Image: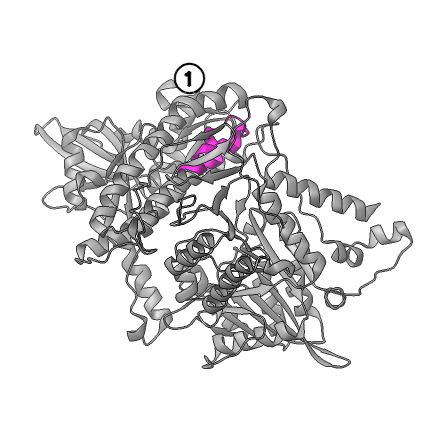
Amino acid sequence: MPASEDVRPSSLSFTPAVEAREVPTEAALDHPHLYFNRELSTIDFNWRVLYQALDDRTPLLERIFFVAITASNLDEFFRKRVGGLKRQAAAGVTAYSPDGRSPQEQLALIRDGVAPLYERLTTFWGTTLRPLLREHAGLHIHDYEALSARQRKRADAYFREQVFPVLTPLAVDPGHPFPFLSNLSLSLAVSLHNEARGTEHFARVKVPNNQPRWVPVDGPMHVVPLEQIITHNLDALFRGMTVAAAHPFRVTRNADIRRDEEEADDLLEMISDELRERRFAPVVRLEITPDMPASLRDLLVDELRIGPRDVYESQSLLGHADAMPLAGRDVPGASFPPWTPRIPARLRREGDPADLARKGKTADHPNIFSAIRAGDVLVHHPYESFQESVQRFVEEAAEDPKVLAIKQTLYRTSDDSPIVAALVRAAERGKQVAVLVEVKARFDEENNIEWGRMLEESGVHVAYGLVGLKTHAKATLVIREEDDGPRTYCHLGTGNYNSKTARQYTDLGLLTCDADIGYDVTNLFHYLTGYAPAQDYRKLLVAPHNMRATLNRLIDREIQHEQDGTGGRIVAKMNAINDVDIIQRLYKASQGGVQVDLIVRGHSLLRPGLAGYSENIRVVSILGRFLEHTRIFYFQNAGAEDVYIGSADWMSRNLNSRVEAIVPIEQDALRQRVVHVLEDALADRRTAWELQSDGRYVLPYPTNAAEEASGLQDLLMRTIEDRSRDILT
């Protein structure tokens, strides 16, 4: 895998939120100026997401999708990151971030960094995207005032029949305290006048979240926001009063609640208590529209106990994440071409009787276990089918009478999960089924508790995670009785066992019956479900057991290879990098002449391209129609390449406080296939943003159609499609 060419073509960029500060001469590797701020780097990531909407090469309806994703990301950012910093600041925490900033300093920088992003997002929706959708996609997002008389009649009828019965106006006065506002709820602040008494009043009306946000008024392509319909029918709620004005607002609450697991007698009870506490957590952001009077804004700020800098003015609607359903409209040419995941080659031969009959062949493998015995199977989602590989692995295990036991980690899964259904069937058939359900998975705690209880009722042995650790590993173990005794079959992957996100996230998975890996995964489950922390692992890298030490050794080995003249090279693909120890080791590798290429979708604390520190490090971020989620780690090893895939990013939380698993890819053909993914990612001149030493991300942008290049994801779709076509011919 040769070192990548350093090409910096004409490009797009934006003013970064991160600050690039001058590094003093001969600064130590822990100097704050060698690191970007995590929070500001996350803001810059969301700029890159928004740019997918701003880019006129993106299909129109997909531009709605990227606006909604940016808004949803910001919601989560305020709930988790801003909420956590506010809690630290309130507690007087004085610990500094790797870039040398206190919680209070970071909160001030976040406000300055988010404000232009939020302004651009909300302005783009109102002034650019809505007119484009109307003109080129026939999707009309109307304001109530612009509706025709016939459309208003329909909207008002919808209000009377569907909305009016569920609304609960809440007055605020000495006898009625300010109402509780639920997280991410959209409300109307209503100013009222009592003509008879000559008095002014305030009321809050919650826009119901169990009603569609976009109400059709003339077929599915003509819609109006629900809150506007409510606003123009408020007289029906406040009879005897005059509605002077109504202004929408939206609140975001802190989701960062401190857990004290050491004192929790019951993990499920602790999580349930936290979910209740989160409902009433402090507000960390208030969103309003510019026309809200100062008096009303001040009232909300006082009642919600926030500061003026916690208020954000939207230049269009509030809650752009709710725009996601609009992206699903059927408009030819306005979305990405549909993609159907292909069936992996060896699984296709045994799983497609029609193809076999046409060729006059019989199935090489009677079941998926036979296919795995013939050699490891690498699956790459969503290019290859999750349903016909990973899901099928679990489903066949549930049905196969020779299967004795199934063990699996569940971090996140889908509603009506076919994986969970298969585990239930397996338990009902008398197989030993054990599942680690991680109830500390952020924002999925309640769902996972319900899954766990349902599995328990079906006879599944359920464990609910480890005290002090979050189980993030993606592993399935199947024990099958065969002619020569029990054999272990394993799946280890980079993504969750979720059939829905498997069509949206790029992930890799390995299906194998390698005895050493089976031994390791068996020990991993003993660690997870029993009191057995002192495990040994032959091939698997497991955090927090041996992963960090092994990664350090692999990085140091590349430095030694470079010194020996055989060349050092490291390539890693992940979601984020913020672990200071790993970053410092990469700086040392760069100083030693090792070429380091990092493909990091999200935030990066590492500063590439700094003379004397990181001039041999390149960082790129790839964004496309799918969410890049694969974690791949490549070490050149003087030509004897080591390649790993797994669940862990190079983040402190993953290496220190999560149970993670990384597995080597040992079969030559599969290893080279993963290497090609890395090479294609580093050669991307269409969707790869390159991080500069000053914090700017630069995106290649052709000046004409002839210069247009393919992005990584388009290339991988074509590659998989060609491979599938070759199999069928």
- Disc 1 is placed on an element classified as loop
Residue located 63% across and 53% down the image? 674
In what quadrant of the picture does the C terminus appear?
A: top right
- Asked if 126 appears above or below 554 in the picture, the reply is above
* Location of residue 276 (image quadrant): bottom left
* Location of residue 120 (image quadrant): top left
Specify whether 36 is left or right of 292. right
Q: How is the image coloured?
A: one colour
- Asked if 556 appears above or below 628 in the picture, the reply is below
Residue located 40% across and 17% down the image? 149
How far from the left and from the top, in percent, is residue 311?
Answer: 23, 38
Q: Is residue 407 visible?
A: yes
How far from the left and from the top, in percent, is residue 728?
Answer: 82, 47
How far from the left and from the top, in percent, is residue 32?
Answer: 29, 51
Q: Main secondary structure of the magenta part?
A: helix
Task: Give the residues in magenta.
Answer: 47-66
Residue located 38% across and 25% down the image? 126
Number of numbered markers: 1
How far from the left and from the top, in percent, is residue 394?
Answer: 64, 65
- Asked if 441 appears above or below 38 in the picture, the reply is below
**As rendered, which of 417 and 535 lies closer to the eye?**
535
Label 1 Cα neighbours within 10 Å, binned few <14 / some 14-19 / many ≥20: few
308 magenta-colored: no
**As rendered, which of 353 and 151 lies closer to the eye?**
353
Specify whether 601 is left or right of 343. left
Residue behind mark 1:
148
What is the three-letter code of the residue carrying label 1?
A: Ser
- For the view shown, which residue lies furthest in the right direction? 360
Specify whether 96 is left or right of 582. left
Q: Is residue 657 visible?
A: no
**As rendered, which of 365 and 571 lies closer to the eye?**
571
